[in-house]
Image: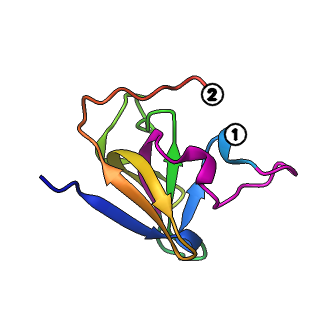
């Protein structure tokens, strides 16, 4: 059985946890230290006025709804100030090249270590 592999352009992804900070505490798009680890995948979409850039992000913490704080694995998590967040399940970082980060879709029951 072939795994579902997702390719996301590096310029379109933010890595949301401290694990992904570089030596100067800046966010990085280099996931080499995270290859093999599982994370939650989400997408932020900016609506009118569209002054922001839509992007994907990875986190070792579950994505929560903005009103009730419940964990959401798939679907809309809420919209605040014309910025919507959507959860896209659990993934494992399987690699990267110069342009893309490669993610493998995981079963919803897969445990993710949240201690970082």
Answer few, some or many: residues within 10 Å of disc 1's Cα (few below 14, many 20 plus, some between 14 and 19).
few
Residue 94 shown left or right of residue 11 in the figure: left
Answer few, some or many: residues within 10 Å of disc 2's Cα (few below 14, many 20 plus, some between 14 and 19).
few
Mark 2 residue element: loop
Q: Where, by quadrant of the figure, is residue 70 drawn?
A: top left
Magenta range is: 22-44
Mark 1 residue element: helix
- Reply above or below: 43 against 71: below
Residue at 25% x, 35% y: name it. 108
The quadrant in which the C terminus is found is top right
Q: Which residue is mark 1?
A: 18
Q: Where, by quadrant of the figure, is residue 3 drawn?
A: bottom left
Percent across and percent down for residue 20 are 67, 47
Could you tell which of marks 1 and 2 lies nearer the N-terminus? 1
Residue at 25% x, 28% y: name it. 109
Residue 51 shown left or right of residue 18 in the figure: left
Q: Which one is nearer the viewer's eye here, 80 or 59? A: 59
User: Quick check: is 27 in the magenta stretch?
Assistant: yes
Q: How many marks?
A: 2
Q: Which residue is mark 2?
A: 116
- Reply above or below: 34 against 5: above
Q: Are marks 1 and 2 in contact (CB under 8 Å)?
A: yes
Percent across and percent down for residue 68 are 40, 29
User: Quick check: is 89 in the magenta stretch?
Assistant: no
Q: Which one is nearer the viewer's eye here, 16 or 105? A: 105
Residue at 54% x, 63% y: name it. 13
- Reply above or below: 1 against 7: above
Q: CA distance from mark 1 to mark 2?
A: 8 Å
């Amino acid at each position: 059985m072939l795994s579902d592999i997702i390719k996301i352009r590096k310029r379109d992804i933010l890595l949301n946890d401290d694990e992904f900070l570089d030596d100067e505490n800046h966010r990085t798009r280099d996931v080499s230290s995270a290859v093999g680890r599982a994370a939650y995948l989400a997408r932020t979409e900016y609506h009118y006025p569209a002054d922001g850039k839509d992007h994907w992000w990875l986190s070792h913490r579950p994505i929560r709804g903005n009103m009730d704080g419940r964990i959401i694995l798939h679907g809309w998590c809420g919209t605040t100030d014309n910025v919507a967040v959507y959860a896209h399940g659990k993934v494992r970082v399987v690699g990267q090249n110069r342009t893309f980060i490669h993610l493998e879709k995981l079963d919803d029951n897969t445990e993710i270590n949240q201690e970082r």
